[in-house]
Amino acid sequence: MRKMIKTLGLLLAALCGVALLTAANKPVRVPPPPAARINWNNTVVRTPVDSHLLGNPNAPVKLVEYISYTCPHCAHFEQESDVQLRVGFISSGKGSIEVRSYVRDPVDMTVALLTHCGPATKFFGNHSAFLRHQTTWMAPLAHLTDGQKARWSNNDFIARTRAIAADLGLYSLMEARGYDRPQIDRCLADKALAERLAQHTKDATEKDFVNGTPSFLLNGVPLSGTYSWAALKPQIEARLR
């Protein structure tokens, strides 16, 4: 009996040794690292209609904003909505915002050209800077001289945009954002872009029924009577549920 027990003990020990050796040689499966989370607030795409989209291009809720840079209501909307849109709407990937210029006058056009200056990733910083400092750079409009008015009516497109930029201090604003004078002048000379922006404005009036700013589309549907963040916010929240 003792001999049998001893034999069984040796056999069990051998089997354990084989099991341990097999386990030691078995490759260890390392779980893949978690997918990096995309910061949609850093994702900017320039569209075929010369607008800029911030956020997930495939977001289920898509907001389009038509703005005019000389519109005080647009500046107010930017100040009220920017943080809330970025935190609660864009960062999750569930929403995107596309900004389209609605050009009403030569000043609007000049500023729109400057917001488009540089790579697409610079647009929303430029856009925000002009709206947040609107009261400062628009202040000279209240007391233009006859000489300034004449320069602003110049038939030479480049001379006109550069005169407006100089008289309103727009060069300084852009230089504070890291642009140099030659870069700014090149953007102010982009007549082809100006012509496209003018056409997009006409299309917005005819196709999206835009007759004031700010105006909005939500998933392609024009929002009638919606001109403020207070009116827009519940409509976005309803579509996020």
Image (tube, grey):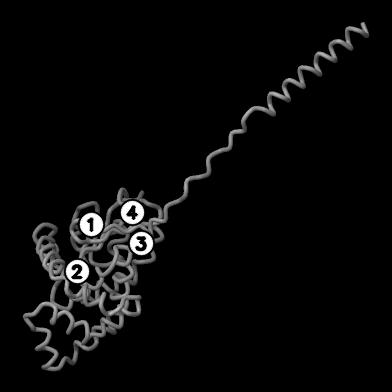
Q: Are marks 1 and 3 in contact (CB under 8 Å)?
A: no
Report the mark closest to the observer, 1 or 3: 1
* Distance of label 1 from label 3 (alpha carbons): 20 Å
Amino acid type of disc 4?
Answer: Gly
Residue at 19%, 87% in the rendered image: 141
Report the mark closest to the observer, 1 or 4: 1
Q: Residue furthest right?
A: 2
Q: Residue furthest left?
A: 155
| Mark before the other along the chain sequence, 1 or 3 | 1
| Mark before the other along the chain sequence, 4 or 2 | 4
Q: Are marks 3 and 4 in contact (CB under 8 Å)?
A: yes
Q: Residue furthest front?
A: 182
- Give the SS element for disc 3: helix
Does 11 sit above or below residue 43?
A: above
| Mark before the other along the chain sequence, 2 or 3 | 3
| Mark before the other along the chain sequence, 1 or 4 | 1
Q: Residue beneath label 3, please?
A: 85
Q: Residue beneath label 1, please?
A: 47
Amino acid type of disc 1?
Answer: Thr
| Image quarter in which the N terminus is found | top right
Q: Residue beneath label 2, please?
A: 213
* Distance of label 1 from label 2 (alpha carbons): 20 Å
- Give the SS element for disc 1: loop
Q: Are marks 1 and 4 in contact (CB under 8 Å)?
A: no
Amino acid type of disc 3?
Answer: Leu
User: Relative to 31, is 4 on the left or the right?
Assistant: right
Q: Residue beneath label 4, please?
A: 95
- Give the SS element for disc 4: strand
